[in-house]
Amino acid sequence: MGGTRSQASFADRLRGVLHRLIALADQSTDDDDLRLRKRVGVVAGYVIGLGALQLPIMAQGIPLSWAMALTMSPVAFINLALLARTKRFDRYVAVLILAVILFPAFVDLALGGMAGSSGGYIFAFAGPLFAILALGPRRATAWLIVYLAILGVLILVDPIVSRAIPPQPYALRLIFYASNLSAPLLIVFFFLRYSELRRRQAQARADELLFNAIPASIAARLKRGEQRIAETYPSTTVVFADLAGFTPWAQRTDPGQVVSFLDGLFTRFDELAAESGVEKIKTVGDAYMAVAGALEPRADHASTAIAFGKRMLSALEEARREGHVALELRIGIASGPVVGGVIGQRRILFDLWGDTVNLASRMQTTGIPGRIHVTASTRELAADDWAFEAQEPMEIKGVGPMTTYLVAA
């Protein structure tokens, strides 16, 4: 038992040491992407530093190989130490990429040129690749030019080097050839795989944000390249809901609690809208707007909207009990044609316009907390499914006197 604990403790200490070595450039302000790029760069630094020490063995003790090993390895580790001390990642990356490009060039020279190293300079292409990851595509182009320039120099001096240094034994050249084919291609593969995974994650996140901001069918049309989206929906029912007493409650309540309450309540409204076949349009402050019969036509849009309103009232009642919040919901509903479309370029919004929208808003503002206030058009469409209580005719702004109805409790 004691041996097992000792082994586990040693493994934990070893993991801790490795984590500190890899995370030496981390800062508290780093996001996940930057932290990952830094750690990849740090690991690459260790690989260069340790790899340089192997050069004399690979080159069978050629004096030039010792000189390169005793230069490249200290440069790599000093660069890591400076990174740990200064946290200047851009400077570290520049030195690292230069080392990644130059080290294979020195190996090429030490082993007798392009043929003697079995094309080992292809390893240097990891430098421009890492520059894309660490510095971005534009700044990486300069490093690609450096890579190509050094390659050109190696080609020019290859006749001289190949005559001065005898070829390596066949077995060693075969090992070099196999590693030079497999390792760089693996680096390229995993780099492309990482880039594609990141691209897909970013695309999925962008799609999620877009689909949350506007209806899915509209978002799909925008992704297909449509520039102007405007439709007329002849038979709809618009729902407006507003929290009565919200402003004074918010003024005397902790902002975090206010945001948490609204987020939880409106998230529940979103779920109910999806379950009821109602399309959420937008929220403005503590007001919530939705529509039935638009985007996806349905004959029972008025009854569906009222059923959705009833479920909203129940959801608020649950939230009141859980959060001890003394708020009521006023709901206004109107039926009729609307126009819908996408507005804005930087902040895209799908919205509805028309007299039906205005009437639904008026029904909400003139309604009774805890009740659903509807127009005569909605009552007429939903009379077979719901009972209504007629109200005294009231003056509706922009319309005049109207007889309205409350859905029976």
Image (tube, rainbow, N blue to C red):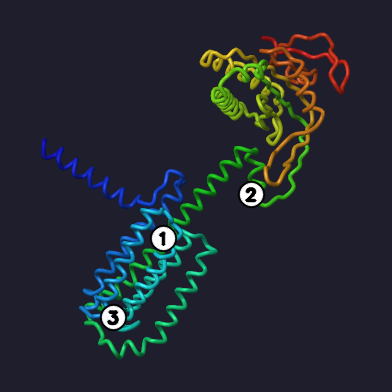
Nearer the observer, disc 3 or disc 2? Answer: 3
Q: Residue at x 23, y 47 (%)?
A: 14
Q: Nearer the viewer, residue 1 or 134?
A: 134
Tell me the number on the disc at residue 111: 3
Residue 113: image quadrant is: bottom left
Tell me the number on the disc at residue 230: none
Instruction: Tell me: 191 left or right of 321.
Output: left
Nearer the observer, disc 1 or disc 3? Answer: 1
First in residue order: circle 2 vs circle 1: 1
Outermost left residue: 2
Q: Are marks 1 and 3 in contact (CB under 8 Å)?
A: no
First in residue order: circle 3 vs circle 2: 3
Q: Are marks 2 and 1 in contact (CB under 8 Å)?
A: no
Instruction: Tell me: 35 left or right of 364.
Output: left
Secondary structure type for disc 2? helix
Secondary structure type for disc 3? loop
Structural distance between the alpha carbons of marks 3 and 2:
54 Å
Q: Which residue position holds label 1?
A: 92
Q: Residue at x 25, y 87 (%)?
A: 166
Q: Residue at x 36, y 57 (%)?
A: 42
Instruction: Tell me: 380 left or right of 287.
Output: right
In percent of width and height, residue 384 lies at 72, 16
Structural distance between the alpha carbons of marks 1 and 3:
28 Å
Mark 3 crowd level (few <14, some 14–19, many ≥20, 10 Å Cα): many
